[in-house]
Image (cartoon, coloured by chain):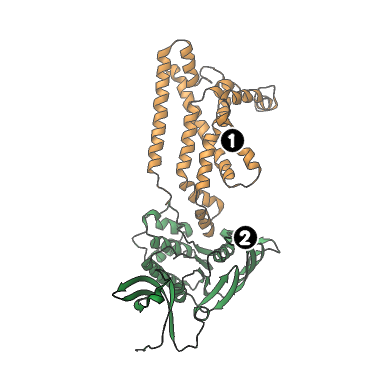
Amino acid sequence: MHEELQPLLLTFELAVVVTAVLFIIGLPLAYWLAFSRGRFKYIIEAMVSLPLVLPPTVIGFYLLVIFSPQHILGHFFESILGVRVVFSFLGLVIGSVVFSLPFMVNPLKAGFQNFPIILKEASDCLGKSRWQTLASVVLPNIRPALLTGMVMTFAHTIGEFGVVLMIGGNIPGQTRLASIAIYNEVEALNYSTAGLFSLILVLISFSVLFVFYYLNRKSPGLF
Amino acid sequence: MIKAHFKKQMQTPGGMVWLDIDLNIAQGEFITLFGESGAGKTTFLRILAGLTQAEEGAIKVGGQVWFDSHCGTNLAVPKRSIGFVFQESSLFPNMTVRENLEYACRGQKSVQEWINTLGLNGLEGQRPSQLSGGQKQKVALARAIVRQPQILLLDEPLSDLDISARLNLQDVIIKVYQKTGITTILVSHNLSEIFKLSKKVFVLEHGKITKTGSPQEVFVKDNLSSKFKFTGEIIKISKDGVLNILTLSIGNQVIKMVASDEEISGLTVGSNVVVASKAFKLTP
């Protein structure tokens, strides 16, 4: 039974890791995109949103090429760090981080942009540093945006298929995620297992979204 | 002592205007900046606070250079010893009243002292969304003053309040000033407020200071008249038979007076008027 559930456990492990990594990367990136006036901002903004419009196979293909041992980056990881990216859990994390980037960055950016600038100025006038203002005033007041970014990233990672199949492959216990396992089971005409996996994914995704909307309903408005 | 001389180009509804300031404010003075919308009053406060940067000039406060375009000095906002009360609410919604004050100053004693002084007892656990407009501005004032800044900047903090809240907060501002003696700069275009609160007025027109003096000198030109004059704000216009009754707020007093149809034409609730009387009697 444990072996059968391995794809589900791996999927949730990946979703948790990707959400955590993207929160750490997405927060400063979204802050910069929200307040920067530089011309490069628009290039970065377009790159961040690219996964929304590109087929997952395209992103998966490029990642597969870039991280293959024949290319500089893949060679660096394999020979210098001793880590293989393609067809490994690390590859799944990198692919998912790239593919889910807009789902974390865009809600956070909107949260920063909608944050009343007067509150930031009031904190500055009270002698607070940029970090104190961010931690005590900005982040607590954009909590719905933080929650949206995390939940969307988590849910989107659970549902990935194309990118993770391209860069991770289909190695049982290592890179076979629930979405890929469902595909395999259907191909093998094993509909009962595919149905069980699908039902579990639906229930968990629904629960996550339900809790998200419930918490967002309870979060106090700004004024 | 505040010494400020600077220039800043401003975008106004009438086009680009240069804010051209050159003024000195003595330590402990309570002054008011008076002027029409777009005259540069708020921009002046923001430049003093460092929230907006002047194009050229210098600002020196108590011997310390806060801004000097020639030397490239521009002290960061958090390093300027200011308390700023904005026109709209700037309380942090995620914090209670007490937490807002404690965020400004960790000293529990000082926070409690200001809660007591400004009559905020009972509101400490409330969030800003649960407060009235007057209470919000009172807490904002307490938060600005609790860290004992060198200068208190008040950017029309009373303009969005109803008359009773406004009168109450005027008294609170006087109380704060009397208790601390802090150099205070108030932006206002309300004459009764200016007469009640400040000793000195700077009139700002199209970015330039055109008049300076006491409220009496600036707003009541004919000082040698035998008439007794005072400035007030209309809080109600009513009719009693053929008579028009104006209810005025003058200082702490609310008075009623009769006015002709001609006198009240063009006046509305909130208009400022100068009331003059030739016959008056003093009683000890």
**Of B132 and B110, the residue lying toward us:** B132
Quarter holding the C terminus of chain B is bottom left
Secondary element type, mark 1: helix
Report the amino acid beneath label 2: Gln
Q: Are marks 1 and 2 on the same chain?
A: no
Q: Distance between the residues labelled 1 and 2?
A: 33 Å
Q: Mark 1 points at which residue?
A: A48
**Of A185 and B210, the residue lying toward us:** B210
Chain in green in the render: B
Secondary element type, mark 2: loop
Quadrant of the rendered image containing residue B268: bottom left
Residue A67 appears in view: yes
Rendered shade, chain A: orange
Report the amino acid beneath label 1: Val
Q: Residue at (55%, 73%) from the top-left corner?
A: B203
Percent coordinates x, y for residue B29 in the rendering: 52, 75
Horizontal arrangement in the rendering, residue A68 relative to residue A169 (left or right): right
Residue B251 appears in view: no
Q: Residue at (61%, 46%) from the top-left corner?
A: A36
Q: Residue at (48%, 75%) from the top-left corner?
A: B198
- Residue placed furthest toward the top: A189
Q: Mark 2 points at which residue?
A: B53
B153 versus A62 height, above or below: below
Horizontal arrangement in the rendering, residue A144 relative to residue B68 (left or right): left
Counting other residues with Cα less than 10 Å from the Cα at mark 2, is it few (<14), some (14-19), or many (20 or more)?
A: some
Quarter holding the N terminus of chain B is bottom right
Percent coordinates x, y for residue B275 in the rendering: 42, 80
Counting other residues with Cα less than 10 Å from the Cα at mark 1, is it few (<14), some (14-19), or many (20 or more)?
A: many
Report in which chain the residue with disc 2 lies: B
Percent coordinates x, y for residue B252 in the rendering: 38, 75
Percent coordinates x, y for residue B120 in the rendering: 37, 63
Report in which chain the residue with disc 1 lies: A
